[in-house]
Image (tube, rainbow, N blue to C red):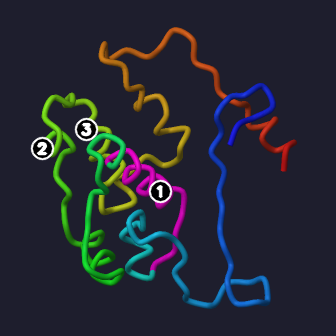
Amino acid sequence: MTTDPGAPWAGRFARADGGSGTTRTQAVLGTPAYLSPEQASGQAAGPQSDLYSLGCVLFEMLTGAPPFSADSAVGLACRHVHDDPGPPSARRPGLSERLDQITARLLAKNPADRPTSAAAAGPGCWLRSTGTQPQSCRYWPASKRQARK
């Protein structure tokens, strides 16, 4: 999604199946390839769950494949809970150690080891080869995001 001035903005989306317009109790919604370990274990999802999913997307963008694969959704969920995907640079040599660190932090099994929010993850995730934050950082202010809802 983009905002009116064209700045990128990530929103939250959910799909509710069941005809009544609501989700089922204890149903897990989401794509298994991006499911956080806590969701796969039946625990509550929070902002850190979204950041885990972002880590999965980042891993796939860097390597061309998701961090885990399996023959079934249950097998894939088990891998998210128990396995370590390793650093992206192991699958695509030449990636920086900084990218490995960022990805590892987002893919931490324990939600407490991940950034507390997207805002907390943002400043540490600038992916410039110089390792410095860009001179001009523009964030879409929360007040404007609230106004669009």
User: Which of the two discs, 3 and 1, labels the residue nearer the N terminus?
Assistant: 1
Q: Is residue 45 magenta?
A: yes
Residue 3's quadrant in the figure? top right
> What secondary structure prevails in the magenta region?
helix
Looking at the picture, does residue 113 appear above or below residue 16? above
Stretch in magenta: 43-59
Q: Residue furthest top?
A: 135
Q: CA separation, marks 3 and 1?
A: 17 Å
Marks 2 and 3, how far apart in space? Answer: 13 Å
Quarter of the image holding residue 101? top left
Q: Quadrant of the N terminus?
A: top right
Point out residue 94 in the picture as x, y percentages from the top left corner: 15, 29
The label on residue 48 is 1
Task: Identify which amino acid the numbered label 3 is placed on.
Answer: Gln
Contact flag, marks 2 and 3 (Cβ < 8 Å): no
Compared with 120, 32 (above or below) is below
Residue 32 at x, y = what percent? Answer: 41, 72
Residue under the image location 77 percent in, 41 percent down: 145
Instruction: Name the residue located 33 percent from the left edge and 84 percent from the top edge.
Output: 74
Query: CA separation, marks 1 and 2?
Result: 25 Å
- Magenta run includes residue 51: yes
For this view, does 36 lie left or right of residue 1?
Answer: left
Where is mark 3, residue-wise?
A: 101
Q: Nearer the viewer, mark 1 or mark 2?
A: 2
Judge the density around disc 2: few (<14), some (14-19), many (≥20) Cα neighbours within 10 Å: few
- In the image, 149 versus 72, the foreground residue is 72
Residue under the image location 40 percent in, 66 percent down: 36
What kind of element bears circle 1?
Answer: helix
Residue in front for this viewpoint, 121 or 4? 4
Closest to the camera, between mark 2 and mark 3, is 2
- Identify residue type, mark 2: Ala
Q: Which residue is mark 2?
A: 90
